[in-house]
Amino acid sequence: MTATFLYYEFVPSTVGVIGLIWKGDRDNAMVWEILLPRQGLAMEECIAAAAPGSEAASNSKIEHFCELLAGIIEGRSAEGTLEYLQMDRLSFFHRRSMEAALKIPLGMVAAYGVIARLAGAPGAARAVGTAMAENPFPLVLPCHRVVRSGGNIGKFGGGSSLKRLLLQKEGVRFADEETVERDCLWNGDCQ
């Protein structure tokens, strides 16, 4: 294996098959991208579009990451997973936005504007929305915990039903099908 070639692995989960694209070699593997299940598309198609020419492969580091990822899907903390991610793929603003999203406690959500403020860019809520939509590491970098200001869950790469399911597994309560309970809205204050 060479350090620049991309590999993939399928991660079975309770929400469907997750695609994991990684690069490196047997000693230094890094997660390049996490692909969520998409309605009507086989994960093989998603992998082929995201990483043409990649090959199926694994190693012990990637297998361990897959176990951690399965726990995140079931509502557990993402602690210990950042070291696996190829974070230098992110622009400065995207990285700041993702770091801010990581502060959202389990069982809570935060509005795009709150994340913009925490990222040091008050008023950049739309830019935060773009950063969340382009997140190459969903689930680990919890873009699913970022919602519209009124608590409407909005869009998500894996679909709104997956976003709702993930939030429910983390303990977020809903007022209706698309809106979280107000007491689950985190305003960025330390808790």
Image: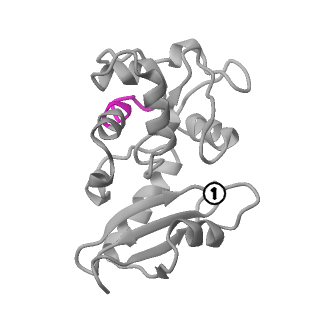
What residue is disc 1 on? 37
Q: Is residue 111 among what the camera can see?
A: no
Q: Is residue 13 among what the camera can see?
A: yes
Q: Nearer the viewer, residue 108 or 6?
A: 6
The residue lying at 47 percent from left, 65 percent from top is 20
Residue 97, how many percent across, how many down? 35, 33
Residue farthest to the left? 27
Does residue 103 belong to the magenta stretch?
yes
Q: Nearer the viewer, residue 188 or 67?
A: 188
* Three-letter amino acid code at the position of disc 1: Pro
Residue 138, how many percent across, how many down? 47, 48
Q: How many marks?
A: 1
Residue 16, how many percent across, how many down? 65, 59
Does residue 101 belong to the magenta stretch?
yes
The residue lying at 53 percent from left, 65 percent from top is 50
Q: Considering only vertical position in the picture, is 3 above or below 69?
A: below
The residue lying at 33 percent from left, 48 percent from top is 90
| Magenta stretch: helix, strand or loop mostly | loop
- Report the magenta residues as a range: 99-106
Q: Quadrant of the N terminus?
A: bottom left
